[in-house]
Image (cartoon, rainbow, N blue to C red):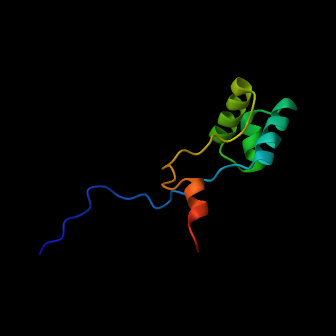
Amino acid sequence: MLQQPPLATIPVNKSPRRELSHGTKHQLQGRSFAGQTATEIATAEAILHETVHNVLHRAEHNNNVDNNRQTGRPKKITPRAKTLIVY
């Protein structure tokens, strides 16, 4: 049987995403208050400048740098029912 070539290449250089720690976000905000630009901060911290810009933008408009609550599938079992389960 003849094997077909893939329809599109799969990118292998994509790194996994990770959240910045609370302290790192405050450090970025502090550097911004000290007068550094987002590009200078990104170079010094080895973080993408888009990430730095997004953190600073969120801090300016929402007055906080906290991570958003992660949405996802809700628990199937309630805490009350969990106490009834005998291990």
Tell which residue pokes out farthest to the top in this image: 61
Image coordinates of residue 57 in percent, x first then y, are 68, 29
Residue 9: which quarter of the image?
A: bottom left
Q: Nearer the viewer, residue 36 or 82?
A: 82
Q: Residue at x 63, y 53 (%)?
A: 18
Is residue 78 in sight in this rendering? yes
Q: Which residue is drawn at 81% across and 33% down?
A: 32
Q: Which of 80 and 16 is in front in this view?
A: 80
Image quadrant in which the N terminus is located:
bottom left
Horizontally, residue 12 falls left or right of residue 22, namely left
Image quadrant in which the C terminus is located:
bottom right
Q: Which of 13 and 78 is in front in this view?
A: 78
Image coordinates of residue 22 in percent, x first then y, are 76, 46
Residue 66: which quarter of the image?
A: top right
Horizontally, residue 3 falls left or right of residue 81, namely left
Q: Is residue 35 above or below residue 9?
A: above
Q: Residue at x 51, y 48 (%)?
A: 72
Is residue 16 in sight in this rendering? no
Image coordinates of residue 24 in percent, x first then y, are 78, 47
